[in-house]
Image (tube, rainbow, N blue to C red):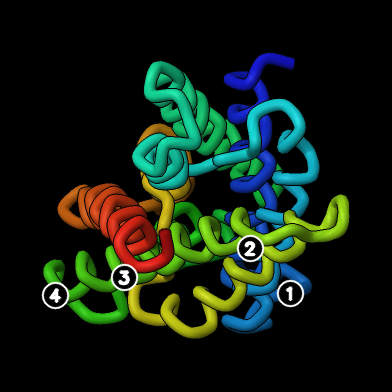
Amino acid sequence: MSPYLAEFIGTMLLILLGDGVVAGVLLKNSKSENAGWLVIVLGWGIAVTLAIYAVGQFSNAHLNPAVTIGMALSGSFNWDLVPGYCAAQLAGAFGGAILVWIHYHAHWRKTESAAIKLAVFCTAPAESSLINALVRETIATMVLILGLLFIGANKFADGLNPLVVGMLIVSIGLSLGGTTGWAINPARDLGPRLAHAVLPIPGKGSSDWSYAWVPVIGPLIGSVIGVLVYKTLFL
């Protein structure tokens, strides 16, 4: 399998399971309706773990433009591959969101709130300041990149790394995710937001493009800072 196809499939699986757990918790008449934030966080952590197991052998399972750029900045990834990886990740995220829409097709009409429907696909801040949200996405992604570099610097038993990365995602979600929904991944937010914009979802509202730049720019800034901190303090 080519690394680009692997990134597409891995990111699609990530979004199918990640946005899928959000849909289950938020949409009406789901058996997991109102299961809460902890279920969402655990669902995303498991989604990341499974996606890495699925395609890690083919592409190292970045699944995230912020990770791809961070690894290139750290010197462990070829810059020539960055555009293709990022494009595959965005396309995979878009495809995964479409699968979530199909899977929960009967539940969209039963859910009245346009904001809840949007929340299935992409993130939104808990309070309205865009600058605060940008700072929070930057910090959370910095922790993600530092965590990945820390994990990469240690040796684990074969097959254990994806579990540790999944635990990292859960930790960030529990500790830092409540402020913005912890996108920490431009593709994870932008791809599904694009899907929300084009899909015929009953009663949907705006895709909130005024906020859409925050979960793209914040993670990219956080990625750069994370690599710089690691190189300055830990090498």
Q: Furthest residue to the front?
A: 235
Residue 195 is at least partly visible in this image: no
How far apart marks 3 and 1 lie (CA) works out to: 31 Å
Task: Using the numbered discs, state the Cα–Cα distance from disc 4 to disc 3 in whole angstroms.
Answer: 16 Å
Where disc 1 sits, the SS reads: loop
Q: CA distance from mark 4 to mark 1?
A: 31 Å
The residue beneath circle 2 is 44
Please report the residue visible at 57 percent of the width from the left and 36 percent of the height from the top.
98
Q: Of callouts 1 and 2, which one flags the residue occurring earlier in the amino acid sequence?
A: 1
Q: Earlier in the sequence, mark 3 or mark 1?
A: 1
Camera-side residue of 132 and 74: 74
Label 2 amino acid? Trp
Secondary structure under tag 3 reads: helix
Give the residue type that dot 4 points to.
Ser
Q: Which is more toward the observer, 156 or 113?
A: 156
Circle number at residue 129: 4
Q: Taking 225 as reference, is 186 left or right?
A: right
Q: Which residue is mark 1?
A: 32
Amino acid carrying label 1: it is Ser
State left or right for residue 61 relative to residue 221: right
Q: Who's the residue at 40% across and 17% down the image?
A: 80
4 or 1: tag closer to the N-terminus = 1
Q: Is residue 7 above or below residue 42?
A: above
Q: Nearer the viewer, residue 117 or 130?
A: 130
Q: Is residue 199 above or below residue 120?
A: above
Quarter in which the N terminus is drawn: top right
As drawn, the label of residue 139 is: 3
Asked if labels 3 and 4 touch by Cβ distance under 8 angstroms, the answer is no
Residue 1 in view: yes
Q: What crowding class fits label 2: few (fewer than 14 Cα within 10 Å), some (14-19), or many (20 or more)?
A: many
